[in-house]
Image: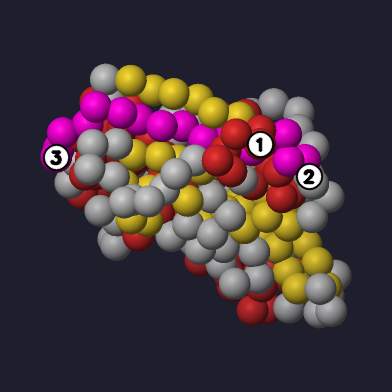
């Protein structure tokens, strides 16, 4: 019997990411063995899961499965390892794909939505980014901003809605939906609204303001 080829712990970033995110994945990430979903296909079809949803789960697994990234600055550090599992839902409400187990016990899970969005599902669905690429881009940008900012200010609750974003532009690569990033002349602002939406808890609003950034700090590739 031929021994299985060992999996290199050094990940190769998938195509389409910014240089900043590509470096983040390949320097900060770790690749671990991922589960193959093909062996579950017949059983899942037998339980009424559409083949298109199984194909979506397999595509996610091919692109992101087995990738462990550093802790996120919010959402209790994010999923431990990106890893697809059996799709959940129905033809009526749509289908969601688990995106990886949480690092701690939580009131919501990380999911891939019906349109490919990356988000959290608690008492309701909160799509954070338009794709998993956007989630990874946001992690890379947070790591970069934290490294180069002269000041980092955390704002919570109702005060988040008082932030003045005049003169700021949205950061497009994070593909923000419920969560967004904003770039100003010398600062970056990350707005985390997912828990407030997903758990109907406005007190969970949070923003991180990274100040004192130069041109490299604002972009970083």
Task: Check contact, mark 3 vs mark 2: CB within 8 A.
Answer: no
Give the side of residue 190 with respect to residue 201, left or right: left
Task: Check contact, mark 2 vs mark 1: CB within 8 A.
Answer: no
Q: Which residue is mark 3?
A: 215
Q: CA distance from mark 1 to mark 3?
A: 31 Å
SS at circle 2: loop
The foreground one among 69 and 190 is 190
Please name which of the two marks, 1 or 3, marks the residue nearer to the observer. 1
Q: Is residue 33 above or below residue 197?
A: above
Q: Which residue is mark 1?
A: 158
Crowding at dot 1, Cα within 10 Å, few <14 / some 14-19 / many 20+, comes out as few
The foreground one among 138 and 79 is 138
Mark found first going from the N terminus, 3 or 2: 2
Residue 137 in percent (x, y) is at 37, 48
The foreground one among 172 and 53 is 172
Q: CA distance from mark 2 to mark 1?
A: 16 Å
Q: Residue at x 66, y 36 (%)?
A: 158
Please name which of the two marks, 2 or 1, marks the residue nearer to the observer. 1
- Find residue 159 and report its image quarter: top right
Residue 215 painted magenta = yes
């Amino acid at each position: 019997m031929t021994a299985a080829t060992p999996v290199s712990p050094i990940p190769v970033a998938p195509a389409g990411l910014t240089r900043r995110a590509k470096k983040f994945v390949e320097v900060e990430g770790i690749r671990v063995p991922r589960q193959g979903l093909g062996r579950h296909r017949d059983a899942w079809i037998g339980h009424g899961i559409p083949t298109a949803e199984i194909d979506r789960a397999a595509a996610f697994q091919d692109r992101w499965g087995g990738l462990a990234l550093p802790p996120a600055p919010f959402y209790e550090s994010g999923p431990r390892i990106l890893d697809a599992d059996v799709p959940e839902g129905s033809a009526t409400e749509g289908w969601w794909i688990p995106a990886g187990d949480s690092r701690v016990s939580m009131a919501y899970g990380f999911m891939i939505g019906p349109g490919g969005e990356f988000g959290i599902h608690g008492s309701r669905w909160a799509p954070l980014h338009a794709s998993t690429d956007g989630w990874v881009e946001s992690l890379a940008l947070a790591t970069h901003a934290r490294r180069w900012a002269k000041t980092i200010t955390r704002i919570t609750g109702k005060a988040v809605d008082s932030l003045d974003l005049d003169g700021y532009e949205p950061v497009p690569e994070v593909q923000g939906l419920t969560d967004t990033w904003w770039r100003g002349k010398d600062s970056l602002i990350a707005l985390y609204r997912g828990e407030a939406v997903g758990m109907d808890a406005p007190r969970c609003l949070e923003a991180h303001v990274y100040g004192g950034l130069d041109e490299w700090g604002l972009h970083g590739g």
